[in-house]
Image: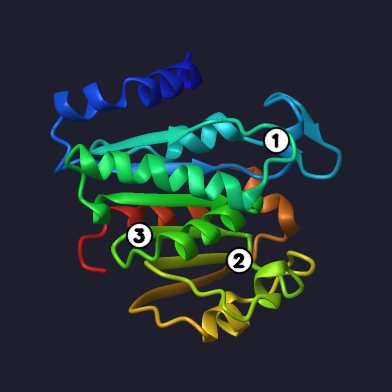
């Protein structure tokens, strides 16, 4: 039922934003990991266990926030999906929602897509939280024109094999972010940390989303 309500909210977005105080509410887009694209939400990863999709959405919820999410199709193209998301974000803004009340939170592949949203939108007011989505050999580092925009929080896990701090990446060094924070966790869960609704990353993500002083 919870997920169905999310889809219905997206469908009736114009009416929802008019009915609520859209200038006060925070709107949070959550983008899940790659595993959840090609598997059911109840299926367990062979190493990390089930992706706590619904639990993560529920924990991200605050009294003044609206969580928007959907299960992506298998092998979704990150660039195309990012451009589709920007259209939805701009639609929210056209119905009266300030850009600084809109956040994009992504885990793993979802954070990868969120970085493309940042690049394509080039909007300094949007908030982003990238979770476990910074790797040294990804395609963004190969594109010397790639830049990040907006207010960015990057959350990494020390034991996540292959991960590299965003602050050490070429795409960060080429950017000119006025609002940036980086957090390194040490849960011992490797990449599996983002499969769980852990306070270690959800609490700082919510603080970033709800802050008015970034």
Closer mark to the observer between disc 3 and disc 1: 1
Rounded to the nearest whole Å, what is the CA distance between mark 2 and mark 3?
15 Å
Mark 1 nearby-residue class (10 Å; few <14, some 14–19, many ≥20):
some
Residue 108: horizontal and vertical position, in percent? 65, 54
For label 3, count other residues whose C-alpha is less than 10 Å away and answer few (under 14), some (14-19) or many (20+). many
Q: Position of residue 33 (x, y in %)?
A: 65, 45
- 98 left or right of 174 in image: left
Q: Nearer the viewer, residue 77 or 8?
A: 77
Residue linked to disc 3: 208
In front of the other: 90 or 30? 90
Residue 41 lies left or right of residue 197; in this view the side is right
Residue at point 61%, 83% (across, down): 170
Q: Earlier in the sequence, mark 1 or mark 2?
A: 1
- Toward the top, the furthest residue is 1
Residue density around tag 2, few if under 14, some if 14–19, many if 20 or more, within 10 Å: many
**Which SS class for mark 1?**
helix
**Residue corresponding to mark 2:** 156
Real-space CA distance between mark 1 and mark 2, rounded to the nearest whole angstrom: 22 Å
Q: Which residue is mark 1?
A: 37
Can the viewer see residue 186?
Answer: yes
Task: Identify whether 120 is placed above or below 105.
Answer: below
| Residue that lies at the very extreme toward the right in this rendered image | 46
The image position of residue 64, as x and y in percent, is: 23, 38
Q: Are marks 2 and 3 in contact (CB under 8 Å)?
A: no
Mark 3 or 1 closer to N-term? 1
């Amino acid at each position: 039922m919870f997920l169905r309500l999310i889809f219905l909210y997206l469908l009736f977005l114009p009416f929802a934003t008019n009915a609520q105080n859209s200038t006060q509410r925070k709107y949070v887009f959550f983008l899940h990991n790659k595993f959840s694209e090609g598997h059911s939400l109840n299926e367990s990863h062979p190493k990390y266990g089930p992706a706590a999709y619904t639990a993560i959405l529920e924990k991200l919820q605050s009294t003044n926030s609206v969580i928007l999410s959907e299960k992506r199709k298998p092998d979704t193209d990150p660039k195309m999906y990012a451009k589709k998301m920007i259209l939805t974000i701009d639609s929210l803004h056209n119905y009266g929602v300030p850009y600084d009340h809109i956040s994009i939170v992504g885990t793993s592949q979802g954070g990868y897509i969120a970085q493309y949203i940042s690049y394509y939108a080039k909007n300094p007011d949007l908030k982003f939280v990238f979770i476990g989505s910074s790797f040294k050999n990804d395609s963004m580092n190969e594109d010397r024109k790639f830049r990040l925009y907006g207010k960015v929080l990057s959350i990494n896990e020390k034991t996540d094999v292959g991960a590299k701090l965003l602050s050490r990446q070429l795409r960060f060094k080429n950017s000119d972010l006025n609002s940036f924070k980086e957090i390194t966790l040490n849960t011992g869960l490797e990449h599996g940390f983002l499969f769980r609704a852990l306070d270690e990353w959800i609490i700082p993500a919510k603080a970033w989303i709800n802050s008015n002083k970034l």
